[in-house]
Image (cartoon, grey):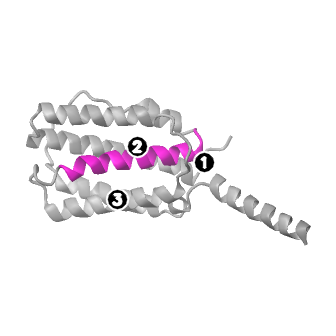
């Protein structure tokens, strides 16, 4: 009986470890992509169509390039961290922008949902590159403060977040279809 119980436990652990190594079913079944595309569309529609202003704060491209080949768990942590940083920004934007409040709330709701779903996929391990990602968002926050939360500054932030969402979708596609080794 003891042998049967042990083999049952081994089988259970094997199944659980397979589930983690396969990644995140929410991403793999296309839900992340669907929500990400919709949030990107909302963000595009919220802002000015004719923005030529920009700021020299670059997306940490090496982070997204480096991690397209990293472990699935780390990719999920990067996506989760980025979504959390985006949420922090937009929680403060409601009173300071002229964007449509319903669209803004819908956008925030979608980003929050994505973060919650990824939280279920996330492991407790560390995140290589998340420190750089957080620093990038701190730099954007400093820029916003230096511009006294102006409408133009918020539009620049909106464009930067759109760029990030696009990069995040590419990173998520490596979870859905991991590159062949």
Task: Indicate whether 100 appears above or below 88.
Answer: below
Question: On the image, which quarter does residue 42 sit in?
Answer: bottom left
Asked whether, in this view, residue 126 is left or right of residue 154, the answer is right
User: Counting residues from the N terminus, which is met first, the one under dot 1 or under dot 2?
Assistant: 2
Residue 74: in magenta span: yes
Image height check: is 150 above or below 42? above
The residue pinned by badge 1 equals 178
In the visual, does 85 lie left or right of 94? right
Q: Which residue is drawn at the image coordinates 55% and 59% (left, top)?
A: 28
Q: Which residue shows up at 25% across the image and 64% down it? A: 106
Label annotation for residue 167: 2
Kindly report the distance in space between the C-alpha atoms of the residues bearing marks 1 and 3. Answer: 25 Å
Asked if residue 79 can be seen in this view, the reply is yes
Closer to the chain start, of discs 1 and 3, is 3
Q: Are marks 1 and 3 in contact (CB under 8 Å)?
A: no
Q: Is residue 53 visible?
A: no
What secondary structure is the magenta-colored segment mainly? helix
């Amino acid at each position: 009986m003891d042998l049967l119980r042990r083999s049952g436990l081994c089988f259970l652990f094997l199944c659980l470890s397979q589930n983690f190594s396969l990644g995140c079913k929410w991403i793999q079944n296309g839900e992340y992509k669907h929500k990400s595309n919709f949030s990107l569309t909302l963000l595009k529609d919220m802002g000015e169509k004719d923005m030529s202003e920009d700021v020299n704060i670059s997306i940490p491209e090496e982070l997204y390039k480096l991690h397209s080949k990293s472990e699935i768990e780390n990719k999920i942590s990067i996506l989760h961290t980025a979504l959390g940083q985006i949420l922090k920004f937009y929680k403060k934007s409601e009173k300071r922008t002229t964007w449509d409040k319903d669209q803004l709330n819908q956008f925030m709701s979608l980003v929050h949902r994505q973060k919650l779903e990824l939280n279920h996929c996330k492991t407790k391990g560390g995140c290589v590159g998340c420190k750089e990602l957080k620093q990038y968002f701190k730099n954007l926050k400093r820029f916003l403060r230096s511009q006294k939360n102006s409408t133009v500054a918020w539009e620049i932030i909106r464009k930067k977040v759109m760029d990030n969402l696009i990069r995040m979708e590419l990173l998520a596609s490596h979870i859905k279809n991991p590159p062949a080794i």
